[in-house]
Amino acid sequence: MAEKLIISFDEYSKIVEKLAIEIYRDYQPTVLVGIMRGAAPILDILSRILKLPIAYIVIQSYSGKKMEDQQGQLMFAREISSLAKNEDFKKVLLIDDLSDTGLTLNKSIEWLKDYGPIKNYIKEVKTACLWKKKSSTFEPDFCPVRLDSDPWIVQPTEHYEELSIDEIIEKNK
């Protein structure tokens, strides 16, 4: 089993805040685009701090029954989910939770630039994530934690993947 890096809610919040500071100092995006599901809490926090519109791309990349299963083929949803105007997509900040292999971020940039409704509005796409693993070939523009190994990162909400609703009901009696 791979080495695990277990992240608490407090640690997670501090890393997202560091990311917000990096972005604020060096870039003025016009929209935040999150890669679901990993970017959902990051996008929520960043949009509140930076006061920017958001959009979501839904991609499925991991397959299997356990959290440590390997990255599989990427499957993109048909549409972006957003209330942002097309003009807001001029300077995109594409966000994921981590750069593991770099495949998801690379393919997402390609997908965004080819996405019909906004492709003619996009002038620039920059990327952000919380963690970059050592073996990742992708270099995010903004990343507060660059790891010197390739651990499985256990984020604060991941334990829910291993719990059934019946276990949660029992726990909350």
Image (cartoon, grey):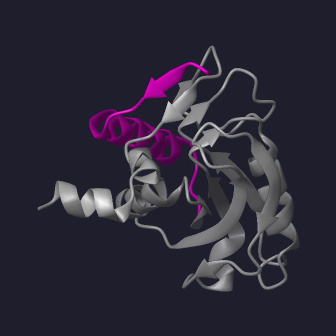
Is 155 on the left-hand or right-hand side of 114? left
Q: Is-magenta flag for residue 18? A: yes
Quadrant for the C terminus in the image: bottom left
Question: Residue 123, can we see it?
Answer: no
Tell me where residue 33 appears, x and y as whole percent: 61, 64
**Front position in the image: 150 or 161:** 161
Is 156 on the left-hand or right-hand side of 131? left
Magenta-colored segment: predominant secondary structure: helix
Question: Residue 47, can we see it?
Answer: yes
Residue that lies at the very extreme toward the top in this rendered image: 148
Q: Is residue 134 above or below residue 104?
A: above
Instruction: Name the residue rendered at 86%, 60% in the picture.
Output: 110
Q: Is residue 158 above or below residue 112?
A: above
Tell me where residue 78 appears, x and y as whole percent: 77, 80
**Front position in the image: 55 or 103:** 103
Is 108 on the left-hand or right-hand side of 28? right
Q: Is-magenta flag for residue 73? A: no
Quadrant for the N terminus in the image: top right
Q: Magenta span covers which residues? A: 1-29
Give the quarter of the image for residue 91: bottom right
Tell me where residue 169 appears, x and y as whole percent: 23, 64
Tell me where residue 139 appears, x and y as whole percent: 74, 34
Give the quarter of the image for residue 102: top right
Is 96 on the left-hand or right-hand side of 155? right
How many tags in the picture?
A: 0
Instruction: Name the residue rendered at 69%, 35% in the picture.
Output: 100
Instruction: Name the residue rendered at 76%, 50% in the picture.
Output: 104
